[in-house]
Amino acid sequence: MDTAVSTADPRDITIIGGGPTGLFAAFYAGMRGMSARIVDSMPELGGQLAALYPEKYIYDVGGIPQILARDLAARCIEQGLQFGADVRLEEQIDELIREPDGSFTLTTNRGRYPTKAVIIAAGKGAFAPRVLECAGYERLLGRGVTHHVKDPAHYEGKRVLIVGGGDSAVDWALNLKDRTRRLILIHRREGFRAHAHSMRLVEEAVRAGQLELLTHREVREIHGEDRVTAVTIFDNRTDVDTHLEVDAVLALIGFKPDLGPISRWGLELERHAIRVDAHMQTSIPGVFAAGDVCTYDGKLELIATGFAEACIAVNYAVHYIDPKARVNPGHSTNLKVFKDREDEVVPVGD
Ligand SMILES: Cc1cc2nc3c(=O)[nH]c(=O)nc-3n(C[C@H](O)[C@H](O)[C@H](O)COP(=O)(O)OP(=O)(O)OC[C@H]3O[C@@H](n4cnc5c(N)ncnc54)[C@H](O)[C@@H]3O)c2cc1C
């Protein structure tokens, strides 16, 4: 792994977080002729949609009656990156350095990112996965143990143990049930926090013999030399152990939201969120915030509001960078940046 820290080319706007809000901010920045960069600590873009509930349907985004979260994430990515925003994944923003000329440098473990303005779209902060507190977890993490499913095809024909009682664990159990040789879902309590409809599908999968469901079970130890070969689980009512031979352990027990270093930048905070004014401006000029990470009177934590806040944040960031630039972007229907494109496209119906 390359651990060298290098300074990247400067961008007009650097967006911390590649969830729906950050991606829409990248789109809007491009539409306004600004160069943009997204930095996200996760291995993929999409924020909570991709990391927490990819298999759930969303019904309350304007103009889209029903869409799977992962499909909305894909659309946000397509729209957000169309103007060539630079994307840096698996990098957590650490420091905000204020330069004498009013610009900034953001630092991560791998890079230094000079920028004229910053938009914080960090949601609930970098998702730190909750870890299983059992022998073998740390040692076998990445070698059969994971807290993040990247490619379901990887589990084809395997014996898989899923740990967790929330949407993520249940959604992945449903997703993998047709692929695995043996699939076991354990939860430390009786009740699951997952969506009622998902739980009905789980019951069907159990009846069909595609899934084994065990409640009041926890992991005592994960076994294996180079890779996972087995687990010992125990019944937390009787303390009786069960040995299971498995090839993979998916510890889908949630993420701890953590604003981390951002909370130490001297921004005005209110209950773990960043206070913004009506321009989405934080207490540091040139640093804006949008989406779940920000708060103001009347704030709602929704995808729809995040989109609107991203739009406001970008337009005021443009004005911060160039005070002569208009805040109002005009209507996309009339913008030259799209008109040029329309000239190349044969309109539907011709
Ligand atoms: C189970 C569930 C169901 C939901 N259903 C709906 C729904 O039906 N409708 C709806 O409107 N909303 C729904 N929501 C809420 C919605 O998902 C959020 O409002 C939305 O994701 C917020 O988007 P965001 O881009 O602001 O933040 P996020 O989606 O949280 O994205 C923030 C990104 O910032 C990154 N990040 C954070 N800190 C750093 C850092 N220091 N450095 C680098 N990267 C960082 C994170 O890794 C993350 O990718 C649901 C949420 C959950 C959990």
Image (cartoon, rainbow, N blue to C red):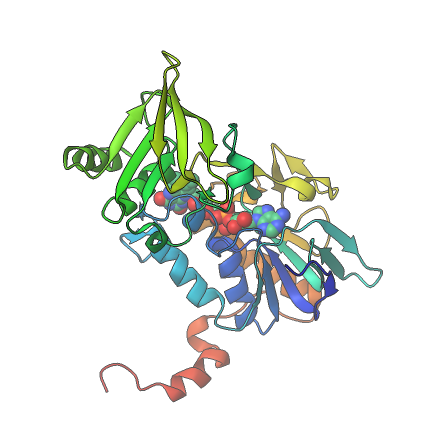
Tell me which residue sits at (46%, 33%) in the image.
Answer: 222
The answer to which quarter of the image holds residue 36 is bottom right
Tell me which residue sits at (45%, 77%) in the image.
Answer: 334
Q: Which residue is most to the front?
A: 225
Give the image location of residue 26, x and y in percent: 54, 64
Q: Is residue 300 visible?
A: yes
Give the image location of residue 225, x and y in percent: 50, 40
When the figure is inspected, residue 69 is found, relative to residue 246, above or below; the finding is below
Dividing the image into 4 quarters, which one contains the C terminus? bottom left
Tell me which residue sits at (75%, 59%) in the image.
Answer: 104
Tell me which residue sits at (32%, 37%) in the image.
Answer: 170
Give the image location of residue 117, x and y in percent: 68, 61
Q: Which residue is most to the left?
A: 208
In the image, taking residue 240 as reference, residue 24 lies left or right, namely right
In depth, the one of 67 and 229 nearer the eye is 229
In the image, taking residue 92 as reference, residue 306 lies left or right, namely left
In depth, the one of 261 and 272 nearer the eye is 261
Q: Is residue 278 visible?
A: no
The answer to which quarter of the image holds residue 9 is bottom right
In depth, the one of 259 and 330 nearer the eye is 259
